[in-house]
Image: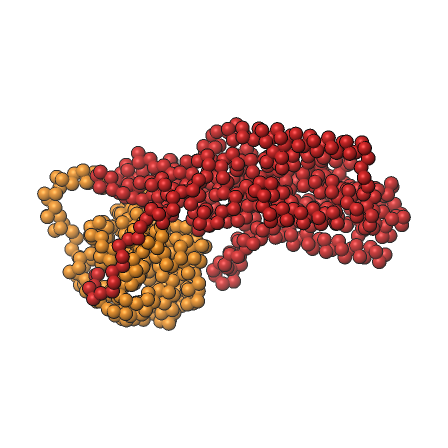
Chain colours: A orange, B red
Amino acid sequence: MNRRDFLKGGAALAALAPAAGTLADAPPAGKSKVVVVRNGEPAALFQRGIVALGGMTAFVKPGQKVVVKPNIGWDLPPERGANTDPGLVAEIVRQCIAAGAAQVEVFDHTCNAWAPCYRNSGIQEAVEKAGGKMVRADREEDYREVTRPQALSMKKAAIHRAILDADVFINVPILKNHGGAKMTACLKNFMGLVWDRQFMHRHNLTQCIADAALYRKPDLNVVDAYRVMQTNGPRGVSVNDIRTLRYQILSTDPVAADALATKLLRFPLDSVPYIHLAASKHGLGTDEDARMEIVRLEA
Amino acid sequence: MGRSRVWRVLRGVRVALAVIAFAATTLAFGYAADLMGLLGQWWMGAPLPEETRFLAGIAKGNLGPTLMAAAARTSWAALVAAAAILALTALLGRAYCAIVCPLGILQDLVGALAFWRKNAPRPRLFALRKGLGVAVWGVALVGGWTVGLRFLDPFTVYGAIAAGGWLPLLLIVALTVWRRRVFCNSLCPVGALLACESAMAPLGLRFTDACVKCGKCVQVCPVGCLDPKTATLDNGRCVRCLDCAAVCPVGAITYGRNKGFRLPGRREALRAGALVAGGVALGGAARVAKPLYPAYGPRAAIAKEGIYPPGAGSRQRFLTKCTDCRLCVTQCVGKVLQPAGTFGAVHLDFDAGMCEFYCNRCVEVCPTGALLPLDLAAKQRTRLGIAAIDLGICVAGVEGYECGACAEHCPTGALRMKEDAEGIRVPTLDARLCIGCGSCEHPCPTRPIKAVRVWPVDVQTLAADPADVFRPTAPTPTVSDDWLI
């Protein structure tokens, strides 16, 4: 059943709705720790927040290969808030190297032409200065096919080799409104690992976003919510789309981070349906406040 | 003997300059960027910053495109460049053909490889040149229509070869193997123009009395411009390759007063006047016929290939101004520009890519003036076409799955997802803002027909400014103690 059919039958189902909550899968034991930091520059927010999660050494062991996946989808400068802040990405790369990482690769499967995206986002220069390596993602030969039978729509996908080969995967999205998916943060950022994005758009985008997160569990998620694109996302039309909130969310649980991120955009949680799908269908995390341990910090 | 050595050195300089110009021109057709990418990958694992755009400027030093640009939009830079080339030709003869022209140098290269055959063009082939030259330039400069240059301008022909065209390459190789630089003096409109000037210039190459009539110069001359038996050297045909002077064992070729430099006789003047009058008349006829061409052109091609690059102005203007030199095609960042084909025009193909919003490289590199100069801000509002959504095949419209690939990519906010009566968010177009860049059509996932398609417009107009349409969102909350999370 697709969503249009579902809505048509919605009135009949409304009576049964209160019972629906009990049908959800049993959540995993324990709580997801989410660190929310605010009032600082993106790099400073990260420096403050990562300490509360045990520091970078809790995630990166000496000699490990790290992949950092920011959002570099658009040929736009940092102030437009369409791509992850370059200072934040560079700080993460620096800390990975300080923790002993053998290599830190950074990439995104961009929407605009990749070279201007890498350059004009400021991320290429920042990452290279910090000692990381920018990796192209515009060629199909850099992707390998992976299957996930438990996925409900995208049961196989070609995933970038940097993700498949890495020991540690750090997911660094920027929080934005999104025309198709309503909101983009941790889970939506997985679309940049996948070669065939059109498949996802064609075959129930919401479900495909939840499915995409099955392909590689992130070891750490860092949501850049310093500049938040409130409207016209994910590309934005001008700086008028941006609210400068100066927040950051850090968690090992991408679902919890996304669930909290909806509050920064002032969207109801159920207006971003893939968050609940990832929690209930795939058990990738929790979207319930009661199952989160939220740490609030000032930078 | 000393004289021959000087010529050999000068010839060496000519070859070196030609190799540099040829390499730079070839690299400008997209190869420089690829090379930088490869070298970067090899050296440091990441592509080098792509600062090779300036190479494309070499196109603006080629006489064919430059004269067209001067006529197409009264470009002062193009006028100065054309005047400089013509002034230098008055002094040095057709050195341009041996040092700057990429097609000329290509023929020299092929000629050097075709060692088994060294036949120079036959004089009777040269009769073609004047009539063809007058016709091409009459139609181009008086008629304002590049149709002749499109197939004969040497820079354009070389562009087709550099962009990977096998047919023009085979034709040029065949001509070169047959009669060396026969193109330059029988078909080339630029050669025709420079030949008139060079033949009448006060200075030129000629034989001295020292000539022993050994015939070595005839063997090396690629244009067949000299005859030691009669001690004549046609400075109109000569491209100043200096091969003859360098090979001469007695130093019998010298630079000095051009024997052809004299007032034309009555008969010659009449013939020249008639030729020019014929060219002007043909140009006038072309001017009258020009507006008919787009209508007469294949309608199917216009419907399918009717989206032209920014600065094209209108279909009618662009179809008659562009020579299809493919510099913009090979430089296109979004890989969306496609070559013209035989009777079409350079166009955007949104199956191949989309027009990148922060790029106006095609406008920057266009050497012929077919693309009018537009700064980035103006280009970002120039409407190349207009999008139309078919909700009957759209993923959101048919299946109710919110897709949004089109709205996601739209750079101006023209296409946005809005709730329909059933609460499904479907793409909605604000036509005021649409610039037809194809950012919607390119990522649209429906097949075989895309649900969002950009349709041609006859005239490129200015779309609304997004800054006028979108107002700032709610002000940023001042920092307070209340946590948003």
Left or right of A58 in this view: A103:
right
Residue A108 vertical placement versus B152 (above, below):
below
Left or right of A219 in this view: B17:
right
Identify the residue shown where x is 32% and y is 66%. Answer: A41
Residue A88 vertical placement versus B65 (above, below):
below
Q: Dividing the picture into quarters, in which one does residue B483 lie? A: bottom left
Q: Dividing the picture into quarters, in which one does residue B384 lie? A: top left
Please indicate, yes or no, whether residue A79 appears anywhere in the rendered image: yes
Q: Dividing the picture into quarters, in which one does residue A163 lie? A: bottom left
Residue A170 vertical placement versus A214 (above, below):
below
Identify the residue shown where x is 62% and y is 37%. Answer: B141
- Looking at the figure, which quarter contains the N terminus of chain B? bottom right
* Residue B485 point in image, percent of width and height: 21, 61
* Residue B231 point in image, percent of width and height: 86, 43
Identify the residue shown where x is 44% and y is 40%. Answer: B461
* Residue B139 point in image, percent of width and height: 62, 34
Identify the residue shown where x is 32% and y is 48%. Answer: B470
Give B167 or A237, whichever is nearer the viewer.
A237
Left or right of A102 in this view: B141:
right
Give B326 or B191, whichever is nearer the viewer.
B191
Please indicate, yes or no, whether residue B406 appears anywhere in the rendered image: no
* Residue B429 point in image, percent of width and height: 33, 40
